[in-house]
Image (cartoon, helix red, strand yellow):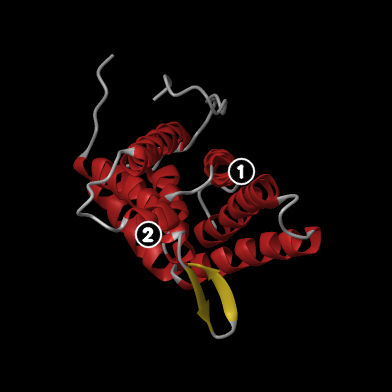
Amino acid sequence: MKRNISMLFMLLSLLFCVFLVLANLMEVKVIEIGGFTATAGLLVFPVSYIINDCIVEVYGFRKARFVIWLGFIMNLIFVLFLQLCIVLPSSPSWPHQDAVETVFGNTARILCASFIAFICGSMVNAYVMSKMKVMNGGNYFSLRAVLSTLFGEGVDSIIFFPVAFLGILPLSTIVALIWTQAIVKTIYEIIILPVTIRVVKYIKKKEDLDTYDNNISYKWWRIDQF
């Protein structure tokens, strides 16, 4: 069966994957702004959820599901090759092996937590966005975008922090991180919402498309239904 892929859809898919990989790179630095401590990846990771919202709103859940899995695979390839780079023997004339291991040598546990949290959080975000659009007849985009992000980021945080840090950090700290990350990322979504609305309107007009997910399968593994 022939599948038509537009340039705009390709661009959104590419940006989605780039921001995921970029977030992985930036996660290694801890920043402090106004007394608030977080990882630098917090600055770019919510963008993937915003792009996810745009794809669901215009192209529907099935294409969003495909892009989520595409992002997962690209991120996995990036991490595997980065780990290969770390374990390869370094030249005696190159003295920075310890620095590379310190910055990019993420533990398997944290990487596993990140991958599981990303898939679950992104799928929940897309599902909530899709179902609310059908229920509300395409109205209340701003509300759908914010609530889908809150649910998606909430699931992401609820999975990531316990899997990555249970037994390492106190439970109270993990709970605080879950709430903080989910709320801050949702506030990020609200702040940038005027831009998201304009982007969605532009894509809908350019593509002459506004998809409603009636009678589709929401099974997260059905990437064959594109």
Name which of mark 1 and mark 2 comes first in the sequence.
2
- In the image, 74 versus 13, the foreground residue is 74
Instruction: Determine whether, in the image, residue 31 is placed left or right of residue 67.
Output: right
Structural crowding at the residue carrying mark 2, measured as other residues with C-alpha within 10 Å and reported as few (<14), some (14–19) or many (≥20): few
Tell me which corner region of the image, top left, top right, bottom left or bottom right, holds residue 86. Answer: top left
Q: Position of residue 138 (x, y in %)?
A: 50, 49
Which residue extends farthest bottom? 34
How far is the residue under mark 1 from the one under mark 2? 52 Å
Residue shown at 43%/37% (left/top)?
Answer: 72
Residue 23 shows in this picture: no
**Quarter of the C terminus within the rendering:** top left
Instruction: Determine whether, in the image, residue 82 is placed left or right of residue 133.
Output: left
The three-letter code of the residue at mark 2 reads Ala
Q: Secondary structure at mark 2?
A: helix
Q: Secondary structure at mark 1?
A: helix
Q: Which residue is mark 1?
A: 135
The three-letter code of the residue at mark 1 reads Met
**Quarter of the N terminus within the rendering:** top left
Q: Position of residue 177 (x, y in %)?
A: 67, 63
**Is label 1 in contact with label 2 (beta carbons under 8 Å)?**
no
Q: Which residue is mark 2?
A: 99
Residue shown at 30%/58% (left/top)?
Answer: 96
Q: Nearer the viewer, mark 1 or mark 2?
A: 2
Instruction: Determine whether, in the image, residue 82 is placed left or right of residue 37.
Output: left
Structural crowding at the residue carrying mark 1, measured as other residues with C-alpha within 10 Å and reported as few (<14), some (14–19) or many (≥20): few
Q: Position of residue 76 (x, y in %)?
A: 41, 36
Q: Relative to 48, is 218 above or below?
A: above
Residue 25: numbered disc: none
Q: Position of residue 137 (x, y in %)?
A: 54, 46
Residue shown at 58%/68% (left/top)?
Answer: 184
Residue shown at 28%/58% (left/top)?
Answer: 95
